[in-house]
Image: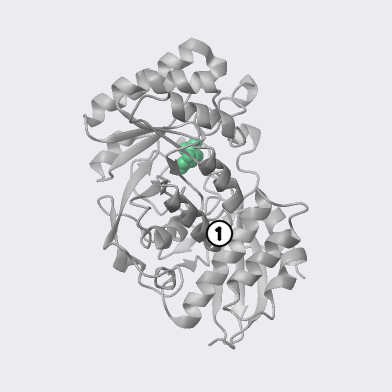
Amino acid sequence: MSEVTINQVRAYTVRGGGADYHDQAEGHWIDAQIATPMSKYPEYRMTRRSFGLNVLGTLVVEVEASDGSVGFAVTTGGEIGAWIVEKHLARFIEGKRVTEIEKIWDQMFNATLYYGRKGVVINTISCVDLALWDLLGKVREEPVHQLLGGPVRDELTFYATGARPDLAKQMGFIGGKMPLAHGPAEGEEGLKRNLAHLAEMRRAVGEDFWLMYDCWMSLDLNYATRLAQGAQEFGLKWIEEALPPDDYWGYAQLKRDVPKGMLVNTGEHEATRWGFRLLMEMECCDVIQPDVGWCGGLTELIKISALADAHNKLVVPHGSSVYSYHFVITRHNSPFAEFLMMAPKADEVVPMFNPLLLDEPVPENGRMSASALDKPGFGVRLNPECGLSRPYQH
Ligand SMILES: C[C@H](O)[C@H](O)CC(=O)C(=O)O
Ligand SMILES: [Mg+2]
């Protein structure tokens, strides 16, 4: 097995949902009015597509081994990611043994340091890394969670992210995270509306169901603190990504200033052990939320998670579908998982990376048994009906 080598890496792009879950058709809840760092510009306030949230599209990376096995993974990264894989990263992948995942990661990261570190380069490295784990699982005929040490519990439990926490409760989820609609540029009136919406949802779901606000980097410290204070009477469980990801100082202050018991979560746009080290050493949050497809992949997440464990922080990955499920089931400090509601009206459970993957497991009644993940690799296949294109070749 250790002699199985990687013959070829190929990078593709695809549009319309998939790993770039923001790339949805008009009218989807995820593209309704949601507070963003661009909301201060009225012309970019009403939808996120207006400022180009969906420009990247999905990147698909395939790695083919000498025994004929093919591993693959998907992330947000589109054509830029495909170029990076084909024109730069391929040299570190092809010819290596399928077991050399750590070495490949280190070479990809160090070779791109001068233009990488965060953002689309790390998304791309993550995608290659996940494809390598998928390949190793397939060569060994084992699920990735077994390669990671095996499940620590029998099932995953999920909270749902979407516009309808009330429906999420009926569907059996343990909580509902809503997008915040109004940002600081909409003043006191917007703040009142944000709180009124939370109050309405609290009435709809009752006392015990978790409710959270996802602020998607849109607030400033003063607004975030006032939102958190106002939200306390409606039992907001956590305030998420309230500030721009580089404002570590703001997060540290926010964590000190939110009402006792309310959690500060962040990290979905953070990357690598060094980025998360800052969040932890500066006491920026209670829960970190790395996206497995954006933070450096599984190889990096293992390190981030160990660091978090030593800092008594929970790790609840952002989105990431099967890449998150296989990890969360193996970690004591990841007690539950996120499920992004991809139905346009958030009124039914559809696979998170729909329609790109076949056999993508979904929670039933807010749960997923470990056995749903018992297939080689990440246990998913590419849907042949999604038209992949290969814009570059090396
Ligand atoms: C709903 C949020 O604005 C975003 O689209 C997803 C996200 O940040 C999350 O799931 O967390
Ligand atoms: Mg979020």
Residue placed most toward the observer, 50 or 289: 289
Left or right, 227 with reference to 274: left
Residue 112 sits in quarter: bottom right
What percent of the width, then of the height, locates residue 262?
36, 30
Q: Is residue 199 visible?
A: no
Identify which residue is drawn at 55% across, 55% down: 293
Report the side of 17 relative to 167 (left or right): right
Q: Is residue 216 above or below residue 333?
A: above
Q: Image point 34% across, 35% down: which residue?
A: 164
> In the rendering, at what x and y percent does residue 376 appear?
43, 75
- When the figure is inspected, residue 2 is found, relative to residue 14, above or below; the finding is below
Disc 1 marks which amino acid? Glu
What residue did someone put label 1 on? 300
> At 54% from the left edge and 18% from the top edge, which residue is drawn?
184
- Residue drawn at x 45%, y 67% is 380
Q: Residue furthest top?
A: 188
Q: Total marks drawn?
A: 1
The answer to whether 17 appears left or right of 164 in the picture is right
Give the quarter of the image for residue 12: bottom right
Quadrant where the C terminus is found in the figure:
bottom right
Determine whether 285 is above or below 142 in the image: above
In terms of secondary structure, where does tag 1 sit?
A: helix
Q: Position of residue 355 (x, y in %)?
A: 48, 56
Up the image or down, 41 lies above or below 291; here it is above
How far across and how far down the image is residue 206, in percent? 21, 29
Of residues 375 and 13, the one drawn nearer to the viewer in this rendering = 375
